[in-house]
Image (spheres, coloured by chain):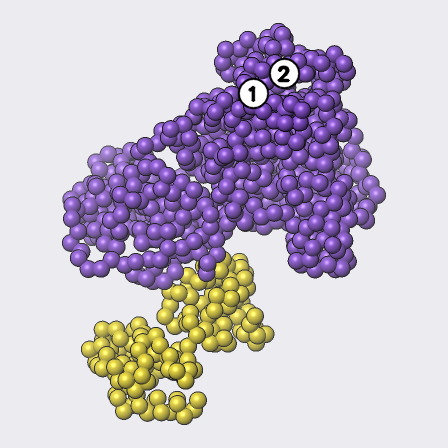
């Protein structure tokens, strides 16, 4: 189900906890699984549960609790913009509107070419540098003015 | 340990270290409102309803999760506490639908009750309420109105902690939280119905009961479960002489507050259209309805004729092991008064060589409640979870503390509990493997090795089991149903006895049915010269009296039983359902099931549990003791003039005498181990949980569960490979007869066996539950 490489990474995470508490590695395991598959399909969740000796629904509880796990397939680039209060006061709602009109999609939608998915995010701990956009859970872009947003979309669009 | 002084609402008491405020308040009889707290489950403290005021604490504290400290002062009903509680109530009601008038929980709803006590008369909330989609989680538990859920997670914790499998979970976060099963899966636990009871609102309700009555219209009557040896205490809720629902009656010593789905939902069969409601007589091959007088007179006449022509020993009586003590007593009394010793209730047993060598009635060997205090356990030959669902939960919970569970069996079924060591072998090797444990224990304890086991070579897995047993202080050894049904059951029993003496352990049998112990107390077993259940089938009788059982499904050898019935001159079936008896019986007499008769069960721990009828008998059904008594009168036998079931029971003497007869010891059973290895495929037969007796077989909703799927031929991948078949293939299985089944690969089975369930019409033709069989592609 998951590649040997991913399983090796998961084993490394499991090794960090006592042998009878494998389930402590569930969040890390889900991140690794998502990195490989792009999103967490029910089969993937089921597999992770089996690998860690957890009930699948217990893994699903974790996967559905946190925003950064994708329970649906996303576009090649998932742009998550923080709309919590501090970012909101610093213009993130306007930035979000700009992204929406630029990409032609609303939150939780994917562009028809499958390149971009737009998500609303929770606080990323970078309120001083609002508005904040996170690309594919890994790359954080701060102080996103409209021009920086356009540049980001252009850059990603070209690379794809 | 030092006790802690605490004052709740001005009343002082001392509680042990680690007690919570909730427990302290309960001990004083003070009610603290709560939803998520349940005394049998772990503490979640997520409903916040039990907030109380604690001295020196700046904020209200949840009573269920606040440990008592020495000198603590708590107010559960002060202004501050009440304000906190009504605040929580207001939040809980924000999203709760106002559908109490159509809600099945209405009238027995904790939220409804507490809203009256702690809620406002009107809501200040005017925005839209959230909607949670309904789910289909199987045929037993209804999750049709999940908007009612208040997210107490009792159902989730019940699954994790008591049922042993987490089938429901709470996904999402905050306002988006909801209780779901994993992507459309059903809830398949054999204890799932308890989630309905512990749900404090109407989110999880009973699917079979749904919309059939309001709770305040129902009468509540105590009764006892007829399905397994535990004898779970039940409350049957009835309306207009129909049982509409069954719920547990709390009894800490027996079933705590849980019952199995089999106990809970089998009542559907009591209202089934298949009920036999009038006496029937077969005349010239055709059935006609008859009145009791003529039907019973015919039975008396025909039994008399058989006796006159072929002697009384040509008559055999087979009694269901879930018949009441009174019924069993009269059945054996009637048979013996006719002059026959052929009477038995041990229908699925195949080895009777311990008869006459027993010191008393086999039983659990200890009170049920003692299971929790055992630190080492060995269970031999048991489909523990399916045969004893509620008893198994006691092992499961004890296993989370210090108890080490060891298993010797022919199938490594998922028990949903921690198993320390196991030896999984084909059925014909069970005695040898148990013998190895005996030898290993004797060696470890430096005791003389019993000669019967001296020649055995001890394998690694059995040595580990022996080491586990030797390291315990309180050890329990149990023989399961599979061991009791085993063709070498007496040897297994005898080996268990040796082991218990060596280890200094208590040992017992888990018990096959509701009245397995009672059958011995009523002496419903053959005496000298009598035939046991198996012999009555293998050397067919001319006449049979069948009481509450279906020979083709309830006997050890279904094929032979069917043949014996077909060949008999005269068969009278005293039965709740006609079933297949219409093929071979001559008279059918409608028997009142457990809800329609008074009677007594003696459960596995020897607890005598008497009950009364909860509803009037359906149609012309009559309680079994009355049928047998009148039959005795018509046969002009002495001693059949009892006026009540109590009078029947009184003939068995004082109850103190019954308990004195509980004794598992056997004397003089020859144990000869190391018999030649058979290379033929062995049958492993379980009695599926929802086919175990005539009542459950007809319980509609239970028959829709996964546990009620028709039997398949289960085998290891390696066995399938040798046979040249693969999963899903149709195969012909030949034993005494031949049936066609689908192959399922199941690597939990040992080499050399095929597991095919018994007690099911599709496999009845195969015959004995144990033995050799052959499999080939169809």
- Residue A82 drawn above or below residue B50: below
Q: Do we see residue B364 in this rendering?
A: no
Location of residue B654 in the rendering, given as x and y in whole percent from the top left corner: 54, 14
The quadrant of the picture occupied by the N terminus of chain B is top left
Residue drawn at point x = 41 percent, y = 80 percent: A75
Identify the residue position indicated by label 1 in the image. B290
- The part of the image, by quadrant, that contains residue B222 is top left
Q: Give me the disc on residue B332.
A: none
Residue drawn at point x = 52 percent, y = 46 percent: B704
Q: Do we see residue B641 in this rendering?
A: yes
Secondary structure under the numbered disc 1 in the rendered image? loop
- C-alpha gap between disc 1 and disc 2: 10 Å
- Residue B87 drawn above or below residue B569: below
Residue drawn at point x = 71 percent, y = 32 percent: B561
Q: In this view, does B762 lie to the left or right of B141?
A: right
Q: The yellow chain is which one?
A: A
Residue drawn at point x = 59 percent, y = 45 percent: B405
Identify the residue position indicated by label 2 in the image. B298
CB of mark 1 within 8 Å of CB of mark 2? yes
């Amino acid at each position: 189900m998951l590649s040997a490489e991913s399983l090796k990474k998961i084993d490394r995470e499991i090794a960090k906890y006592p042998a009878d508490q494998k389930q402590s590695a569930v969040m890390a395991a889900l991140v690794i699984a998502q990195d490989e598959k792009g999103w967490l399909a029910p089969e993937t969740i089921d597999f992770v549960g089996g690998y860690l000796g957890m009930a699948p629904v217990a893994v699903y509880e974790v996967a559905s609790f946190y925003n950064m796990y994708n329970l649906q397939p996303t576009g090649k680039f998932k742009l998550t913009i923080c709309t919590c209060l501090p970012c909101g006061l610093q213009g993130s709602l306007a930035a979000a509107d700009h992204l929406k009109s630029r990409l032609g999609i609303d939150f939780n939608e994917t562009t028809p070419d499958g390149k971009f998915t737009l998500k609303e995010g929770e606080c990323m701990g970078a309120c001083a540098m609002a508005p904040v956009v996170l690309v594919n859970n890994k790359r954080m872009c701060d102080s996103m003015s409209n021009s920086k947003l356009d540049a980001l979309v252009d850059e990603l669009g070209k690379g794809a | 340990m030092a006790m802690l002084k605490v004052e709740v609402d001005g009343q002082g008491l001392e509680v042990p270290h680690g007690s919570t405020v909730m427990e302290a308040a309960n001990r004083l009889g003070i009610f603290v409102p709560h939803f998520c707290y349940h005394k049998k489950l772990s503490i979640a403290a997520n409903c916040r309803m039990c907030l109380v005021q604690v001295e020196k604490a700046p904020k209200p504290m949840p009573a269920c999760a606040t440990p008592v400290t020495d000198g603590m002062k708590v107010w559960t009903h002060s202004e501050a506490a009440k304000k906190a509680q009504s605040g929580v109530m207001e939040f809980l009601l924000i999203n709760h639908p106002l559908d109490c008038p159509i809600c099945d929980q209405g009238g027995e709803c904790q939220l409804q009750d507490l809203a009256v006590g702690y809620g406002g008369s009107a809501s200040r909330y005017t925005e839209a309420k959230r909607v949670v989609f309904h789910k289909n989680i199987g045929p037993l538990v209804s999750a049709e109105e999940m908007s009612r859920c208040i997210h107490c997670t009792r159902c989730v914790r019940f699954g994790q902690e008591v049922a042993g499998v987490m089938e429901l979970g709470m996904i999402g976060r905050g306002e988006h939280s909801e209780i779901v099963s994993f992507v459309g899966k059903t809830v398949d636990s054999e204890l799932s119905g308890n989630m309905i009871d512990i749900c404090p609102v109407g989110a999880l309700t009973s699917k079979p009961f749904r919309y059939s009555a309001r709770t305040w219209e129902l009468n509540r009557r105590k009764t006892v479960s007829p399905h397994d040896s535990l004898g779970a205490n039940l409350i049957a809720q009835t309306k207009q002489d129909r049982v509409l629902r069954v719920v547990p009656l709390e009894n800490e010593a027996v079933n705590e507050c849980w019952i199995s789905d089999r106990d809970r939902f089998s009542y559907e069969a009591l209202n089934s259209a298949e009920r036999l409601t009038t006496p029937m007589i077969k005349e010239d091959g055709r059935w006609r309805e008859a009145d009791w007088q003529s039907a019973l007179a015919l039975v008396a006449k025909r039994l008399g004729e058989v006796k006159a022509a072929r002697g009384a020993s040509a008559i055999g009586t087979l009694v269901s092991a879930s018949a009441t003590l009174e019924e069993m007593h009269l059945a054996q009394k009637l048979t013996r008064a006719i002059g026959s010793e052929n009477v038995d209730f041990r229908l699925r047993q195949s080895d009777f060589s311990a008869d006459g060598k027993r010191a008393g009635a086999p039983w659990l060997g200890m009170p049920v409640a003692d299971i929790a205090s055992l630190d080492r356990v060995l269970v031999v030959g048991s489909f523990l979870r399916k045969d004893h669902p509620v008893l198994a939960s006691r092992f499961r919970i004890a296993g989370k503390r210090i108890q080490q569970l060891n298993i010797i069996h022919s199938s490594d079924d998922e028990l949903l509990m921690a198993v320390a060591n196991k030896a999984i072998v084909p059925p014909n090797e069970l005695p040898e493997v148990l013998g190895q444990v005996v030898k290993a224990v004797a060696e470890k304890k430096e005791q003389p090795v019993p000669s019967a086991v001296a020649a055995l070579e001890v394998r690694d897995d059995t040595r580990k089991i022996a080491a586990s047993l030797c390291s315990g202080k309180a050890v329990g050894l149990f023989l399961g149903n599979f061991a009791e049904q085993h063709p070498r059951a007496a040897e297994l029993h005898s080996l268990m006895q040796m082991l218990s003496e060596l280890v200094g352990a208590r040992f017992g049998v888990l018990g096959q049915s509701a009245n397995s112990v009672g059958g011995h107390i009523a002496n419903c077993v053959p005496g000298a010269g009598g035939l046991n259940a198996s012999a009555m089938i293998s050397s067919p009788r001319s006449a049979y009296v069948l009481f509450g059982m279906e020979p083709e499904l309830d006997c050890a050898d279904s094929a032979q039983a069917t043949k014996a019935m077909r060949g008999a001159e005269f068969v009278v079936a005293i039965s709740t359902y006609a079933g297949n008896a219409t093929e071979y019986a001559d008279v059918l007499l409608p028997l009142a099931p457990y809800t329609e008769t008074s009677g007594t069960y003696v459960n596995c721990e020897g607890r005598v549990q008497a009950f009364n009828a909860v509803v009037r008998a359906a149609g012309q059904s009559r309680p079994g003791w009355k049928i047998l008594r009148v039959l005795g009168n018509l046969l002009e036998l002495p001693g059949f003039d009892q006026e009540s079931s109590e009078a029947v029971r009184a003939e068995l003497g004082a109850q103190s005498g019954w308990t004195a007869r509980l004794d598992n010891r056997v004397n003089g059973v020859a144990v000869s181990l190391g018999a030649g290895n058979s290379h033929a495929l062995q049958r492993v037969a379980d009695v599926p949980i929802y086919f175990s007796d005539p009542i459950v077989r007809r319980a509609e909703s239970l028959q829709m569960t996964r546990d009620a799927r028709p039997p398949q031929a289960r085998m290891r991948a390696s066995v399938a490979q040798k046979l040249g078949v693969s999963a899903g293939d149709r195969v012909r299985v030949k034993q005494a007869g031949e049936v066609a089944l689908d192959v399922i690969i199941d690597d939990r089975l040992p080499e050399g066996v095929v597991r095919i369930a018994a007690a099911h019409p599709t496999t009845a033709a195969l015959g004995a539950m144990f033995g050799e069989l052959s499999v080939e592609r169809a």
